[in-house]
Image: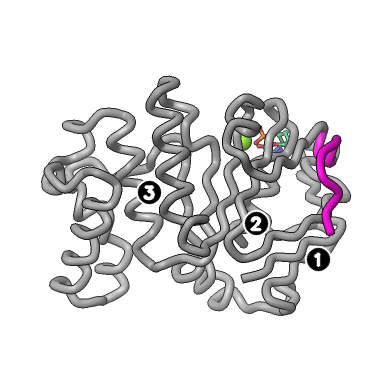
Amino acid sequence: MNLHATNLRRVHQRGSHDIVALDDVSLDIRPGEFLTVTGPSGSGKSTLLHLLGLIDSPTAGTLRIDGVDTATLSDDERSGFRRRVFGFVFQSFLLLPGLSAWENVATAELLDGRPLRTQRARALALLDEVGLADRWDHPPDELSGGEQQRVAIARSLMPDPQVVFADEPTGALDQSNSASILSLLRSLTVDRGRSLVVVTHEPAIATSAEARVLNLRDGRIAEGPVPA
Ligand code: ADP
Ligand code: MG
């Protein structure tokens, strides 16, 4: 899947004045590519991730997915991308308390009316891939932070996504957990032909990941590789 963003701009209204969260950002993401987006807090990283993931829409500029201008998509088509083509991982894991690990992994598919047996089998296989085969029936509060993020990664992979977006996925983890979560994310996405976009405010993570690095400052691309 190819994402092609041209001159993306996102302006928020706060009271009577405008906040330019993102301005004039152009980039390409190709199949199997690993991109990290870095920059200080407030530089527009999450805004960019939300625009690329069709969670939010730009004020100006264009996002094409495999050549299709996303401005022409209906709400249903946009949500179809979010649920079936993209995977999302967030800093705070966003697991449902009171549900077991496998139920957290499979909930969206089960709510979508998919058969329990196949979805449960797929969830268990993914929990195995993230190293949690023996934790499949534990609720989030019986798991460590690193384990909870592994559950969230397994959940993001349920729809067999073509692009995984991760917003500060290691922000709540210590250093050694951060490194293993990043390498796990890479091995389950990039190494299998999926694209991976990781937002992090820690430059060390961005550079150590051996990924293409996009630096944002005040909503604009500051330095780094020029997009093709
Ligand atoms: P980052 O993820 O790099 O910390 P964000 O993309 O969250 O930055 O935010 C970029 C800028 O846009 C910040 O100044 C932030 O306060 C502002 N912003 C983000 N979302 C909103 C919103 N919904 N309403 C108003 N301002 C927002
Ligand atoms: Mg953010």
Residue, disc 1: 62
- Comparing 153 with 83, the one in front is 153
When the figure is inspected, residue 30 is found, relative to residue 72, above or below; the finding is above
Residue 19 shows up from this direction? no
- Per the model, the C-alpha gap separating discs 3 and 1 is 29 Å
- N-terminal label among 2 and 3: 2
- Badge 1 crowding class, 10 Å Cα cut-off, few under 14, some 14 to 19, many 20 or more, is some
Q: Secondary structure at mark 1?
A: strand
- Quadrant of ligand 2: it is top right
- Per the model, the C-alpha gap separating discs 2 and 3 is 22 Å
* Highlighted range, magenta: 218-228
When the figure is inspected, residue 28 is found, relative to residue 43, above or below; the finding is below
Where's residue 224, x and y in %? Answer: 82, 39
Q: Quadrant of the C terminus?
A: bottom right
Judge depth for marks 2 and 3 and give the one in front: 3
- Badge 3 crowding class, 10 Å Cα cut-off, few under 14, some 14 to 19, many 20 or more, is many
- N-terminal label among 3 and 1: 1
Q: Are marks 3 and 1 in contact (CB under 8 Å)?
A: no
Judge depth for marks 2 and 1 and give the one in front: 1
When the figure is inspected, residue 2 is found, relative to residue 176, above or below; the finding is below
Residue, disc 2: 56
- Per the model, the C-alpha gap separating discs 2 and 1 is 13 Å
Residue at the (75%, 33%) spot, across then down: 43
Residue at the (70%, 48%) spot, across then down: 48
Say what amino acid the circle numbered 3 marks: Ile
Q: Secondary structure at mark 3?
A: helix
Residue, disc 3: 153
Residue 145 covered by magenta stretch: no
- Comparing 30 with 97, the one in front is 30
Colour pattern of the rendering: one colour
Residue at the (24%, 44%) spot, across then down: 131
Say what amino acid the circle numbered 2 marks: Asp
